Amino acid sequence: MAEINFGKTVSIAQACNIILSTPMNRYFLRGEPGIGKSSILKTLSVSLPQHEVSYIDVPNMDLGDIAMPVIDRETKTTAYYPNSRFKIHLGKPVITMLDEYTKGADPIKNMLHPMLEVANPRLGDISIHPESITFLTGNLSSDGVGDSLKAHSMNRIIPLHVRKPDADEWIGWAINNDIAPEVIAWVKQFPHAMASYLDESQSDNPYIFNPKKVQSAFVSPRSLERVSNIVKVRSQLDTDSLICAMSGAVGESASRDMQAYIEFSDQLPTWESVIADPKHAKVPEGAGACAIIVFGAIAKLTKDTISPFMTYLERFEPEWQACFAINIAKSPSKQSVAFSSAKFADWVQKNEDLL
C-alpha cells in the first residue's frame, strides 16, 4: 500500500500556488536533481506578467556580480550599486529566483541574505519593491550534493519539499513541450522511471537518481528533455553514436530500453500515410508502438487532420483510444483542436464508459 503524503511534499504546481498566495514569504523549494524546480520561475512569470524576472545562479556568482561600491567624491562616501541582473533599478516588482542558493559560497549567501527579509527586503542598502517575490531552490540534504544552510537563514524561510512529477504528470507536460513521442511512450510503459529514491521499494530501480550509487547519468524530467533532443535527430546518427549520446543523457539502462521504442517508431506508418488513408494504414500491434502513435499524434494534430486520425484511431484497442482522448483533452494547446471536431465529439459520446 502506498504511503499517504499528509502534506509532506508538494507538486511543482502546488509550490507555485503557495508562492502566489503568500508572495511576502520566502520559500525554499527543495527537491531531487532535475525535477523541474527551476521551471517555477517561468510559471510564476506567466501568472504575473507585470513583474520583471531575475534568475540568479548563486553557486556561479562572485561578490562583484551582486553589487559594486561606487565613490561619491562630494560626500567622500561609498554606496553599493546592485548589478542590473537583479532588475531592482527598474523600480518595478521583480520575481527573483535564487537558484541553488544552498550551494553558494558563504560570502555570497551573506550578501544576498537581506533579500530573505519579509519587512524591508533589500540588496545592500537598496530596498526591493514591496510587491516583489523572492524564492530559493536547492536539493535535499539526502541527495548528497553539497547543500547547506545556517540556522539564522532557515528561520527566515519556509522549506517546501517539492516531489518529482509522476509519469502521468510528466507526460501531460511533455505533450505540450515538444518532447519526442518515443520518449513519452517509453515513460508511459515504464512509469517507475519517474519514481523517487526516497521510496525504499525503489532501491534496485536502474533508471533513477540514487545518492547511494555511483552514477554519471539518470532519468529525470531534465535529462528526458535532453535525450528527446537526441532522439529527434537520430537519422543523422549511426547506432553507436545514438546509444552513446542517449546513455550520457539518461544512463545506459534507460537508453538501451528506449532504443527499442526508437526501432518501433522507425517501422511505423508515416503520419502522411495515416492521414491520407486512415482506413488502410497499418495499425501497430505492440503496446510500445501504439503509445508512440498516440502521443505523436497529439503533438501533430491540427483541425484539418484530427478527423482522418480519429478514423484511424477507431481501429486501435479501446484502451489506446481512451489514452488519446484523455491526454488531448488535458492538453492546453490541443484542446481547441479536439473540442472543435465533430468526429471527436462523436467518439466521446459513443465511448463515455471508457473515460
Image (cartoon, rainbow, N blue to C red):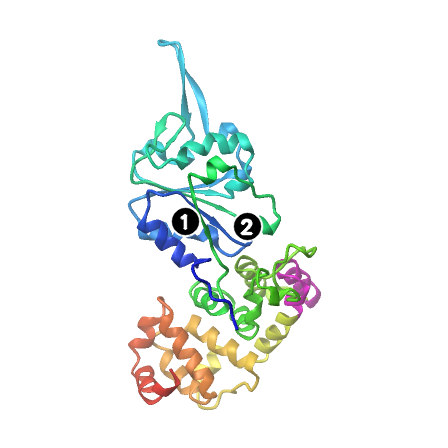
Q: Indicate the quadrant where residue 305 lies.
A: bottom left
Q: Indicate the quadrant where residue 258 lies.
A: bottom right
Q: Residues within 10 Å of mark 1 (few under 14, many from 20)?
A: some
* Horizontal side of residue 289 vs 255, given as left or right: left
Residue 139 x/y as whole percent: 54, 49
Q: Nearer the viewer, residue 349 or 282?
A: 349
Tell me what residue is drawn at x 40 percent, y 12 percent. 77
Residue 1 x/y as whole percent: 52, 73
Q: Say above or below: 41 vs 330.
A: above
Q: Nearer the viewer, residue 300 or 330?
A: 330
Q: Which residues are magenta?
A: 239-256
Mark 1 against mark 2, which lies toward the viewer?
2
Q: Earlier in the sequence, mark 1 or mark 2?
A: 1
Residue 93 x/y as whole percent: 31, 39
Tell me what residue is drawn at x 44 percent, y 64 percent. 173
Q: Residues within 10 Å of mark 2 (few under 14, many from 20)?
A: some
What SS does tag 1 mark?
Answer: helix
Q: Say above or below: 162 vs 301.
A: above
Tell me what residue is drawn at x 53 percent, y 34 percent. 61
Residue that numbered label 2 is attached to: 140
- What's the magenta bit mostly, secondary-structure-wise? helix
Residue that numbered label 1 is attached to: 41
Q: Say above or below: 38 vs 90.
A: below
* Horizontal side of residue 290 vs 94, given as left or right: right
